[in-house]
Image: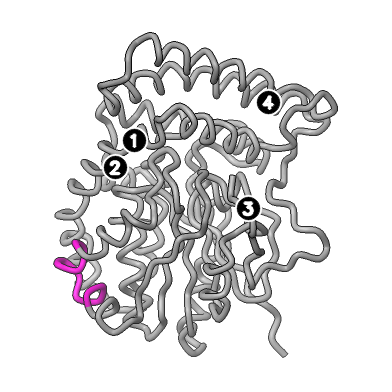
């Protein structure tokens, strides 16, 4: 939970009331039961991750934590009028708070480091592919990579199983991607905006996972936007959550990526590329409760990008902005797919420009 004070994103339209999750739990017994069971199943895998990441923890302490977590999951998924969570955000927030309380703040730390290290050399291959085609034609490949990388998600059961079974591969994901048009496909409109309009003054991109997601999916697009003349700010969690990249990790990662991408190196050197911490520590994000310093520093952004299922679909799918906005995600959960009338692994590239006179 973000300590007070907190502030809403400057670009967010808060009236009528902003609702962080478009599918609340109140009156939705099926959703509460679905997420209760999913979180309970997850505790089995979480125990193994904690044992590996925190080898000094004793079996008795770990068992006590898992018992406390399972009890908290049951309590949090009671009906709302009995004190249960109002939405998925509160359930996710509870779990992260309990991990911190018991001294297990980052069970995925080693996995993130390994996946970042594995993805960085492959960045050169992605950049070489892009260099072989005209600049404006690159957007199709970039968008496909952005959505392919988003399958490195260890919070979704299907993709977590894929990873731990040794079947996770960025290029295989990209090859298996549904053909365009995607489930929600506004890429042509966004392409036209870049082609006809002046570059965005500042792009504020909320990133998601470490590894292939940020390195092979996000960073090539970041470099492209920098070359088009935009300043780019990457917004990342202040605290760990699942395999999401944190702001501190992202600063280090950018310095390493600069060895592969001249646009990244130049952007950092010229102050056109930076990282800001949001104050968040969950895989979803409440855009009405961010660090005031983050809100003030990013207030001049004229494009907001929400990347990943947690930030763009499970939260903020109904958010409205005072500037152009993009939502990007690969759908990796059966209930999320059903809520939007989609199928598993469907792709979302949603672009909503503001009306201009």
> Mark 2 touching mark 1, by CB under 8 A?
yes
- Distance, label 3 to label 2, CA atoms, is 24 Å
Say which label, 4 or 1, has the lower sequence index: 4
* Residue at mark 3: 286
Say which label, 3 or 2, has the lower sequence index: 2
Label annotation for residue 108: 1
Say which label, 3 or 1, has the lower sequence index: 1
SS category of the residue bearing label 2: helix
* Residue at mark 4: 76
Residue 191 coordinates in the image, percent (x, y): 47, 75
Query: Residue at point 60% right, 74% down?
Result: 324
Residue 81 coordinates in the image, percent (x, y): 85, 28
- Distance, label 3 to label 1, CA atoms, is 22 Å
Query: Residue at point 47% right, 30% down?
Result: 99
The picture quadrant where one finds residue 68 is top right
- Magenta region: 256-265
Q: How crowded is the residue under tag 1: few (<14 C-alpha within 10 Å), some, or many (20+)?
A: many
Say which label, 4 or 2, has the lower sequence index: 4
Instruction: Note whether 187 is above or below 51 in the view shown.
Output: below
> Mark 3 touching mark 4, by CB under 8 A?
no
The picture quadrant where one finds residue 53 is top left
- Distance, label 2 to label 1, CA atoms, is 6 Å
> Mark 4 touching mark 2, by CB under 8 A?
no
Left or right, residue 170 beside residue 259: right
Residue 303 coordinates in the image, percent (x, y): 54, 74
């Amino acid at each position: 939970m973000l300590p007070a004070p907190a502030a809403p994103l400057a670009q967010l339209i808060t009236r009528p009331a902003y609702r962080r999750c478009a599918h609340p739990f109140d009156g939705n017994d099926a959703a509460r039961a679905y997420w209760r069971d999913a979180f309970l199943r997850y505790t089995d895998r979480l125990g193994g991750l904690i044992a590996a990441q925190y080898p000094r923890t004793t079996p008795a302490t770990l068992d006590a934590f898992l018992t406390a977590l399972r009890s908290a999951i049951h309590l949090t998924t009671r009906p709302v009028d009995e004190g249960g969570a109002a939405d998925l955000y509160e359930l996710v927030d509870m779990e992260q708070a309990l991990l911190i309380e018991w001294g297990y703040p980052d069970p995925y730390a080693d996995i993130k480091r390994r996946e970042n290290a594995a993805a960085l050399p492959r960045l050169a291959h992605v950049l070489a592919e892009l260099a072989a085609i005209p600049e404006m034609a690159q957007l199709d490949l970039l968008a496909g990579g952005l959505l392919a990388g988003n399958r490195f998600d260890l919070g979704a059961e299907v993709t977590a199983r894929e990873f731990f079974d040794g079947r996770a591969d960025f290029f295989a994901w990209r090859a298996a991607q549904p053909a365009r048009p995607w489930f929600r496909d506004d890429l042509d409109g966004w392409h036209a905006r870049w082609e006809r309009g002046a570059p965005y003054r500042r792009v504020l991109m909320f990133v998601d996972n470490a590894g292939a997601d940020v390195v092979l999916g996000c960073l090539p697009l970041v470099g492209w936007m920098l070359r088009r003349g935009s300043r780019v700010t990457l917004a990342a969690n202040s605290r760990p959550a699942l395999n999401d990249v944190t702001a501190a990790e992202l600063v280090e990662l950018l310095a390493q990526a600069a060895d592969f991408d001249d646009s990244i190196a130049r952007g950092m050197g010229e102050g056109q590329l930076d990282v800001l911490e949001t104050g968040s520590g969950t895989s979803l994000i409440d855009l009405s409760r961010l660090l005031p310093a983050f809100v003030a520093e990013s207030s001049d952004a004229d494009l907001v990008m929400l990347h990943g299922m947690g930030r763009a679909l499970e939260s903020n799918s109904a958010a409205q902005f005072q500037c152009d906005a993009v939502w990007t995600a690969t759908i990796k959960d059966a209930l999320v797919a059903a809520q939007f009338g989609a199928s598993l692994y469907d792709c979302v590239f949603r672009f909503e420009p503001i009306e201009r006179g």
